[in-house]
Image (cartoon, rainbow, N blue to C red):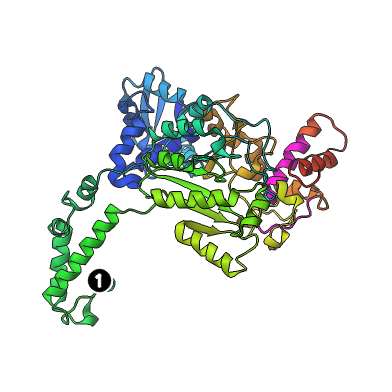
């Protein structure tokens, strides 16, 4: 019997199709239309969802299998097995897209069904909703704290067509956010904008018009308070509030509006109008990063020309956010740390432009020197009023940061020292789940696909799109050495071989320790295969060098 099983990619695709209405609400029809562009037809997409829906139903025991020349709906609870007509080409098409795999299996139906359910809940990309495109490894600054070690010469990046090809299966699977970073992504500004334009064809970056949104939520397209008050929900609320006019305060149900016999009918109408006005305001002015939309994020150091032109172009696509960073609110300190004059001014200029153009800007503030003077405090207040500012009091101890003194920004955590990794500890504080259950996939300038920005120099990751398709890469994550070292315990065993004198920096998170240990294991195992003498010492030296601990 040939059993049709969903792959990692197939399970993610099905899960996101089943959740379109829940995730996108009033924008769900638009999302389905955009997704359909990535299939041969809308029917092909809908049939995939319909055929395999029961694979994600905990109570279902049904699966698809081929016996002889016919596909059947198999179930251990049914004697009658319906035949699926005219699906041969369809199943073959899903196979080609990397959504299903065909497995010869003669075991009991109960065991087969258990494995099908396990495919879904143990899917390593189950939580992937983001893709980070490292557009280039090149950079135009010389930051003292750069965990990548500065501009990585030779890493111009993949071609636009290579990136588009890699994105297609992930977009089809329903990923919701795409980030563009580097290096410095604006060094390839034309390619950046081409990829933003391409992605926007399949992402919902603009919601439906106000009238349609009101129709979805309230059953009316009348965008006025009086129009809203005529809807069923408000008629029902008015009736409820009028009933409360006969109650004492202690009789009012918990979480109900504060209307009692002490109030008047006029108070009820006033509350209703205030409530309707509030709802209208929420519909007209949704949160900056609307949860019912997809999104694109540009990560930039701000050091590029024609800032307003780029900001306005990005704004035209809809839900696009820009993120930049500050090291200090002192201009001289900032420019000195970034290795070029004028960086602080560029960040401030971008901040002002985004505010004027009403484009969401997020600023990561590293607090390297703090706000010591009144002027510093005033400058910090300026940025806090202009953008969303995240205060960060740590620096990743990799790359350039290892050769510059940022130890004062890292409080050493009790769980975070070389040799302290343990699967019994918390994610980010002694352990990492990102390489077995990633929420984001990174496409590097070299073509490598991984999970973490800081793993840029790890010898092997999930795969390379220059030699494998993205579908094959994500479907084979369980077979990669990176995944297996977390599952078989080798990352915990081998960590004690790292030379603590070489990696003597303090860490307040487990990120650096995980990266260094992974790089060490992969390097040592390569050296052993090559028959190199003293593989432990050599691996320690290589990893220490590529991550900046020694010159």
Residue 410 in sight: no
Residue 522 lies within the magenta run: yes
- The majority secondary structure of the magenta stretch comes to helix
The residue at the point 16 percent across, 79 percent down is: 263
The residue at the point 44 percent across, 28 percent down is: 4
Crowd tier of the residue under label 1, counting other residues whose Cα lies within 10 Å: few below 14, some 14–19, many 20 or above: few
The residue at the point 54 percent across, 63 percent down is: 380
Give percent across and percent down for residue 519.
72, 41
Q: Nearer the viewer, residue 484 or 454?
A: 454
In the image, residue 66 sits, relative to residue 226, either above or below, namely above
Looking at the rendered structure, the secondary structure element under dot 1 is loop
Q: Which range of residues does the magenta coloring cover?
A: 503-525
**Quick check: 119 left or right of 551?**
left
The residue at the point 25 percent across, 62 percent down is: 278
Q: Nearer the viewer, residue 306 or 492?
A: 306
Give percent across and percent down for residue 451.
58, 41
**Quick check: 403 left or right of 28?**
right
Q: Nearer the viewer, residue 17 or 58?
A: 17
Residue 205 lies within the magenta run: no
Q: In the rendered image, which quarter is residue 158 located in?
A: top right
Location of the C terminus by quadrant is: top right
Give percent across and percent down for residue 78.
34, 35
**Quick check: 70 left or right of 474?**
left
Q: Nearer the viewer, residue 493 or 316?
A: 316
In the image, residue 260 sits, relative to residue 278, either above or below, namely below
Residue 295 in sight: yes
Q: Residue furthest top?
A: 69
Residue underneath mark 1: 256
**Quick check: 294 left or right of 408?**
left
Give percent across and percent down for residue 355.
42, 52
Total labels: the figure holds 1
């Amino acid at each position: 019997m040939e059993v049709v099983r969903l792959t990692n990619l197939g399970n993610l695709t099905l899960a996101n199709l089943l959740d379109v209405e829940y995730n996108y609400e009033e924008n769900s029809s638009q999302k389905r239309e955009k997704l359909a562009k990535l299939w041969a037809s809308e029917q092909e997409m809908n049939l995939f969802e319909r055929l395999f829906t029961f694979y994600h139903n905990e109570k279902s025991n049904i699966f698809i299998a081929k016996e002889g020349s016919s596909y059947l709906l198999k179930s251990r609870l049914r004697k009658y097995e319906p035949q699926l007509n005219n699906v041969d080409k369809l199943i073959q098409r899903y196979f080609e897209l990397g959504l299903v795999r065909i497995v010869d299996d003669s075991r009991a139906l109960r065991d087969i069904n258990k494995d099908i359910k396990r495919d879904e809940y143990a899917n390593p990309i189950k939580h992937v909703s983001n893709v980070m495109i490292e557009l280039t490894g090149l950079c135009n600054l010389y930051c003292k704290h750069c965990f990548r070690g500065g501009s990585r010469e030779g890493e111009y990046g993949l071609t636009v067509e290579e990136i588009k090809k890699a994105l297609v299966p992930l977009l089809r699977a329903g990923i919701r956010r795409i980030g563009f970073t580097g290096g410095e992504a604006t060094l390839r500004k034309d390619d950046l904008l081409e990829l933003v334009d391409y992605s926007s064809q399949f992402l919902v970056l603009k919601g439906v018009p106000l009238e349609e949104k009101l129709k979805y939520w309230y059953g009316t397209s009348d965008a006025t308070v009086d129009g809203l008050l005529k809807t069923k929900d408000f008629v029902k609320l008015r009736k409820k509030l009028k009933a409360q006019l006969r109650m004492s305060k202690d009789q009012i149900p918990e979480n109900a509006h504060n209307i009692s016999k002490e109030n008047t009918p006029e108070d009820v109408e006033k509350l209703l109008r205030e409530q309707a006005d509030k709802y209208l305001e929420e519909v007209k002015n949704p949160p900056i990063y609307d949860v019912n939309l997809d999104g694109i994020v540009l990560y930039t150091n701000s050091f590029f020309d024609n800032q307003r032109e780029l900001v306005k172009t990005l704004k035209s696509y809809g839900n696009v956010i820009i993120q930049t960073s500050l090291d200090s609110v002192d201009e001289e300190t900032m420019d000195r740390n970034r290795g070029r004059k004028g960086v602080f001014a560029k960040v401030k200029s971008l901040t002002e432009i985004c505010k004027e153009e009403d484009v969401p800007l997020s600023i990561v503030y590293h607090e390297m020197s703090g706000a010591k003077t009144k002027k510093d405090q005033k400058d910090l207040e300026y940025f806090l009023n202009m953008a969303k500012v995240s205060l960060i009091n740590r620096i990743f101890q990799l790359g350039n940061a290892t050769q510059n003194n940022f130890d004062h920004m890292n409080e050493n955590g009790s769980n975070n020292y070389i040799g302290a990794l343990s699967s019994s500890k918390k994610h980010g504080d002694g352990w990492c789940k990102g390489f077995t259950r990633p929420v984001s996939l990174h496409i590097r300038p070299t073509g490598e696909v991984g999970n973490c920005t800081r793993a840029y120099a790890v010898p092997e990751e999930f795969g390379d799109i220059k030699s494998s398709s993205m579908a094959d890469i994500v479907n084979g994550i369980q077979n990669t050495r990176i995944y297996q070292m977390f599952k078989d315990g080798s990352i915990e065993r081998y960590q004690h071989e790292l030379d603590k004198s070489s990696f003597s920096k303090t860490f307040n998170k487990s990120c650096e320790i995980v990266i260094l240990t992974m790089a060490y294991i992969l390097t040592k195992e390569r050296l052993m295969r090559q028959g190199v003498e003293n593989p432990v010492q050599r691996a320690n030296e290589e990893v220490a060098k590529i991550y900046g601990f020694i010159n």
